[in-house]
Amino acid sequence: MTEVWRNWAGNQSARPARVVAPGSVEELSAAVVAAGAAGLPVKAVGSGHSFTAIAAAGDAVLVRPDNLTAVRGLDRGAGTVTVESGLPLHRLNRLLATAGLSLTNMGDIEVQTVAGATSTGTHGTGRDSGSLAAQIREVEIVLADGSVRTCSATEDPELFQGARLGLGALGVVSALTFAVEPMFLLSAHEKPMGFDEVLHSFDDLTAVNEHFEFYWFPHTDRCSTKRNNRSQGPAAPLPRFRAWLDDDFLSNTVWEGACRVGRAFPGAIPTIAQAASRAWSERRFTDEAYKVYTSPRKVRFIEMEYAVPREAATEVLRELKALVERSDWRISFPVEVRVAPADDLWLSTANGRDSAYIAVHLYRGTRELSYFTEVEKLMAAHQGRPHWGKLHTRDAEYLSSVYPHFGDFTALRDKVDPERRFANDYLRRVLGA
């Protein structure tokens, strides 16, 4: 009997019929064909950093990409790198840095596989630069019949439009080609600000900074803001002890303890929030881009995130704050706010509109799930689009109303996977049968 698969947060699990770990695209193709002959669905998993059941593979063939981690090619002239689907982002970042190169933008963690991160729409924050999937220039994917297809903007462009951010619904991605650029430095400026002050200046802050985000601490009027902009240098990283103290000890070890206390004694959470909101002081540093974009995340939680039109962000945030204040919830985790420019990916949360991302979190085991329920109602009232890898209850009917190209994607799915070899319960809910 196969072992139970669980995601990072521990809120999703499944027992697959069998597990395969192909070491080449040929072996991956053979595994898909064999699954089809046995009448079994196929699901690929990465590092398990999705909070939804998007990768759950009950009674299916579970494809682990642990052996698909090669760097196939680096083309400095074209400004691209081609890597296999199971390569973790942290390894890609360091390989690129060794070559003097960098991704243009990325999220704040780097433990996901490249295919898992892009297939769920992982993003950072950026005035002009979008998600990881928006940086893809070519996709190699194994379809339900075992065929290996390579697609790009000029070769099989319809498949490319869907496969860059495909939710695992079209096939199993075996390799990706990303646009890269010469390594650059980012200067980070992190500063506490008041909630009203941030919202009053939100448009200016997102306009003048290449990368802006902030965290609001529920039960307080305090925020922690982050501004990251390109720098000519020289590099001036945080002293090693300060980096450990802020980003490891305070943000993880101490925060884990505070969350445990808050879970056991919810009445203490407002006091903890006041203390936490004052723990992060102003700081500045300059370092290689990926070191500024990413931070260690060791405290386990569950998360819901919605993208709303950027022009609605401040209104939604004020409504969210009022919602928390009139409730009896005790919310220990801060609310994270980021931005992204409009893009053309069919299932991107930023498709066709400049977007603001509002993410709410709960420490594992916290019993405040009505918080997510009410926040989701608020986001839906503003045409919010849920992050595909984070908790939500939206279905195909709702999603078809907020994604202009939803029908294009499902039509493509009908074409390349008519028997739903790659379906699971989550995909049936969000895409339809």
Image: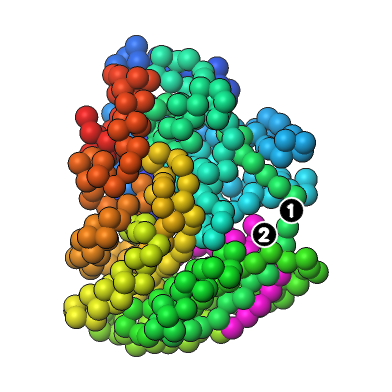
Q: Quadrant of the C terminus?
A: top left
CB atoms of marks 1 and 2 within 8 Å: yes
Front in this rendered view, residue 372 or 410: 410
Q: Quadrant of the N terminus?
A: top left
| Residue at the disc numbered 2 | 289
Q: Secondary structure at mark 2?
A: helix
Label 1 Cα crowd, 10 Å radius (few <14 / some 14-19 / many 20+): some
Residue type highlighted by circle 1: Met
Farthest-out residue, right: 234
Residue 293 is one of the magenta-drawn residues:
yes
What stretch of residues is rendered in magenta? 282-299
Residue type highlighted by circle 2: Ala
| Residue at the disc numbered 1 | 183
Picture coordinates of residue 153 (x, y %)? Answer: 55, 30
Identity of the residue drawn at 46% across and 26% down = 159
Front in this rendered view, residue 95 or 1: 95
Identity of the residue drawn at 74% across and 53% down = 183
